[in-house]
């Protein structure tokens, strides 16, 4: 079970969503992988009745993109041809039967320029709230795509940057996972700030799994778990170095 914590990343995604709903133009939220973006998007979708979809390899072409929208909104897809699927999307996204639910699109960076332009054109015609979220980098393309890319980026109403985990984020996550002891909290702060929220949650879930979720997670359990994980030795070294620094400055 995924624990939702209102981290800085989650609050940024929430602000981006609220902006998209209020202004009715496409909004982009970007950040590095592992910051909790997907968890936040799913939580917001569930709390607000929004449609959620994730761009995968098989949804990168135009026809699969229309099929993805049908699935996200729970609309039966009787049509087989791209033109008919596009017309169906225009109908159920056009608010003809009442306000259209907002659309949250995860892993937006996997879209090709052509497909993303088609989605933005659909939003422009229908006027539904659209939040695009993905990893930080410019949209893929070649020199020949510069004009198309500029067209796309000019249609994005606002861009939100999802920042790195903060100390407060790590502490909140630690509290939700029943971490105990000042030294244990200091360890997870160091680990979280130097990896990602995803890596920190995985670490604490592994710690809890060892004891079947019974009891608290102390520093010794964190260190034991790190010793048997990949790259755990590097993390342990970092924790010990930072611990020595803190003791010297105390």
Image (spheres, helix red, strand yellow):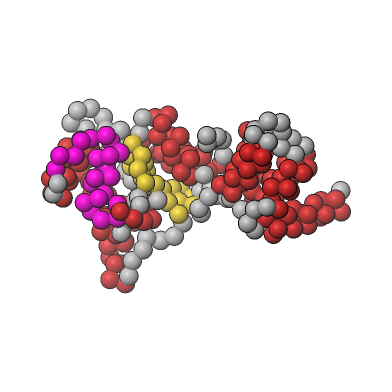
Left or right of 216 on screen, residue 82 = left
Left or right of 250 on screen, residue 22 = left
Give the main secondary structure, helix, strand or loop, of the magenta stretch. Answer: helix
Residue 150 to residue 125: above or below: below
What residue is drawn where x is 76% and y is 43%? 219
**Magenta stretch holds residue 71:** yes
Closer to us: 162 or 195: 195
- Report whether residue 145 is seen: yes
Closer to us: 100 or 33: 33
What residue is drawn where x is 66% and y is 44%? 167
Residue 64 to residue 217: above or below: below
Q: Position of residue 194 (x, y in %)?
A: 64, 54
Judged from this view, the residue extending furthest toward the bottom is: 143
Give the magenta part as a residue range: 59-79
Q: Position of residue 86 (x, y in %)?
A: 17, 46
- Report whether residue 168 is seen: no
């Amino acid at each position: 079970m995924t624990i939702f914590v209102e981290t800085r990343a989650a609050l940024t995604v929430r602000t981006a969503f609220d902006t998209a709903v209020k202004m009715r133009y496409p909004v982009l939220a970007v950040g590095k992988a592992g910051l909790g973006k997907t968890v936040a998007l799913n939580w917001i979708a569930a709390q607000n009745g929004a449609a959620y979809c994730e761009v995968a390899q098989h949804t990168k072409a135009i026809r699969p993109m229309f099929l993805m929208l049908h699935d996200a909104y729970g609309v039966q897809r009787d049509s087989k041809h791209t033109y008919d699927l596009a017309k169906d999307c225009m109908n159920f996204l056009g608010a003809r039967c009442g306000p259209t639910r907002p659309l949250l699109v995860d892993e937006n960076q996997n879209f090709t320029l052509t497909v993303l332009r088609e989605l933005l054109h659909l939003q422009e015609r229908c006027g539904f709230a659209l939040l695009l979220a993905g990893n930080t980098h410019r949209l893929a393309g070649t020199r020949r795509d510069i004009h198309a890319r500029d067209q796309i980026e000019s249609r994005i109403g606002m861009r939100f940057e999802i920042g790195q985990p903060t100390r407060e984020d790590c502490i909140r996550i630690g509290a939700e996972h029943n971490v105990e002891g000042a030294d244990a909290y200091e360890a997870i702060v160091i680990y979280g700030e130097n990896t990602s929220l995803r890596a920190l949650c995985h670490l604490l879930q592994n710690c809890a799994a060892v004891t079947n979720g019974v009891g608290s997670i102390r520093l010794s359990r964190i260190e034991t778990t790190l010793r048997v994980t990949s790259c755990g030795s590097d993390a342990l070294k970092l924790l010990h170095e930072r611990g020595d620094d803190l003791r010297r400055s105390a």
